[in-house]
């Protein structure tokens, strides 16, 4: 018997995985594999809500899967699959859609932001995005959902939809609990916005050491430190906040003192961070290269994950259908 709670989380295949994804979500997923019975999903259907090139989708999924597996998400210790391989998710999304007030969906912050950004393609998928997300979670009757703070509102809606469905049709879904990712927001090289592909401020996990240095060189530090001789203020410097996430404690303490004393400049500090970054990313890049050498093997792992996920989703849907009056009555 498996006594571990079921956990579910998803990631969009946006292409290159960056340090914010790694420290924000992925590392946490890796750790949680020991704590929960984990299911992780590459949500390609969610990625359809904005314009995209279908000929690139397979490569984006591969990039995402490679980055996850190379970082330590282990298909032998969790279920890792692609959303579009499990059609039960869309079936459940429809059932949940009939439980979701339109006015409630219109209030979601992510919808408000996205609809402003994509005014030229304001499709219904952007509005119902969180319903599909609820379906992802509930199709596996997950009890916990590890996500960043920005997803907390969507999960509140997932719980509401579970409750509404259960009240209307009879109990099927436990209400999933949000487990917030421990890492705070990780800012990008601009030092202002959250690290994000759309902001072009990322440090990519699989970039070469030279590419990383090129990005790092231009990263914003303490903007009031104009000259090398000026004492720096680590507490406002974004590069220092990265050190705190990745560098050994002794290095962090050294950098902090030397920055305040102006005995090192920003470039010295960045060189140190480059070292810490490579120490973290070299093994991941090496594993990724091995995985890229055999993409079929990666897709085979995803297919195995999908087979497991379908078993779980089918079981849920047999019950949900019966509750809704479709097919034979529940046993
Ligand atoms: N909306 C999430 C994001 O953008 C991704 C996601 C889709 C997800 N389905 C999910 C997260 C289910 C957790 C659970 O990050």
Image (spheres, grey):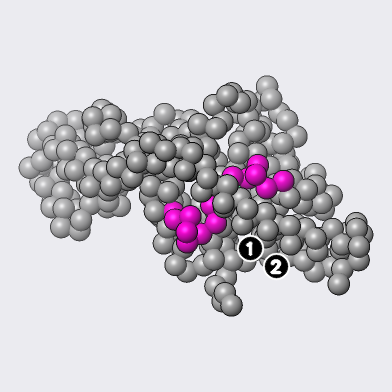
Task: Reply yes or no: does residue 86 show up in magenta.
Answer: yes
Kindly give the residue lying farthest to the left in the view shown: 263
- The residue at 39%/53% (across/down) is 72
Determine whether 300 is above or below 316 in the image.
Answer: above
Report x, y in % for residue 130: 68, 47
* Image x and y of residue 330, in percent: 87, 68
Instruction: Give the residues drawn in magenta, as a range.
Output: 73-87
Judged left or right of residue 111, residue 29 is left
> Which quarter of the rendering shows the N terminus?
bottom right
In the picture, the quarter occupied by the C terminus is bottom right
Q: State whether label 1 is within 8 Å of ligand 1.
A: yes
Q: Does residue 147 lie above or below 273 as drawn?
A: below
> Would residue 278 be found to the left or right of residue 41 on screen?
left
The vertical placement of 211 against 61, above or below, is above
x and y, in percent, of residue 124 in the image: 75, 34
Task: Please tell me which residue is depicted at 20% across the width and 58% down the height of the picture.
Answer: 249
Residue 129, percent across and down?
68, 42
Occupied quadrant, residue 311: bottom right
> Circle 2 is placed at which residue position?
174
The numbered mark at residue 21 is none
Q: Is residue 81 left or right of residue 253?
A: right
**Pointer 1: what residue?**
142
Is mark 1 in CB contact (under 8 Å) with mark 2?
yes
The residue lying toward the viewer, choosing from 102 and 134, is 134
Using residue 102 as the reference point, say whether residue 220 is left or right of it.
Answer: left
Helix, strand or loop at disc 1?
loop
* Mark 1 vs 2, N-terminal side: 1
What is the distance, in whole Å, between disc 1 and disc 2 at their CAs?
7 Å
- Looking at the image, can residue 39 be seen? yes
Q: Secondary structure at mark 2?
A: loop
| Residue at 23%, 29% in the rendered image | 210
Residue 330: in magenta span = no
């Amino acid at each position: 018997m498996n006594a571990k709670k079921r956990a579910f989380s998803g990631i969009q295949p946006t292409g290159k995985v960056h340090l914010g994804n790694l420290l924000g979500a992925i590392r946490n997923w890796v750790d949680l594999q020991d704590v929960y019975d984990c299911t992780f999903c590459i949500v390609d259907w969610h990625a359809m809500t904005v314009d995209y090139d279908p000929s690139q989708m397979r490569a984006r999924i591969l990039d995402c899967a490679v980055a996850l597996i190379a970082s330590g998400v282990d298909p032998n210790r969790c279920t890792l699959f692609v959303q579009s391989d499990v059609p039960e998710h869309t079936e459940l999304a429809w059932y949940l859609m009939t439980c979701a007030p339109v006015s409630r969906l219109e209030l979601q912050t992510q919808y408000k932001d996205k609809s402003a950004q994509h005014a030229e393609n304001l499709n219904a998928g952007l509005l119902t995005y969180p319903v599909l997300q609820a379906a992802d979670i509930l199709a596996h009757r997950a009890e916990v959902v590890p996500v960043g703070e920005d997803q907390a509102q969507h999960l509140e809606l997932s719980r509401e939809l579970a409750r509404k469905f259960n009240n209307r049709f009879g109990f099927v879904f436990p209400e999933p609990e949000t487990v917030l990712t421990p890492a705070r927001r990780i800012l990008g090289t601009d030092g202002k916005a959250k690290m994000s592909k759309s902001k072009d401020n990322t440090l990519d996990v699989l970039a070469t050491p030279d590419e990383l240095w090129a990005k790092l060189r231009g990263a914003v530090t303490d903007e009031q430190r104009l000259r090398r001789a000026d004492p720096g203020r680590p507490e406002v410097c974004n590069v220092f906040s990265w050190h705190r996430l990745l560098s050994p404690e002794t290095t962090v303490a050294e950098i902090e003192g030397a920055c305040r004393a102006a005995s090192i400049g920003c470039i010295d500090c960045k060189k140190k961070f480059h070292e810490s970054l490579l120490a973290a990313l070299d093994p991941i890049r090496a594993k990724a290269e091995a995985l890229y050498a055999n993409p079929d093997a990666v897709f085979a792992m995803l297919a195995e994950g999908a087979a497991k996920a379908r078993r779980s989703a089918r079981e849920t849907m047999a019950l949900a259908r019966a509750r809704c009056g479709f097919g034979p009555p529940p046993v």
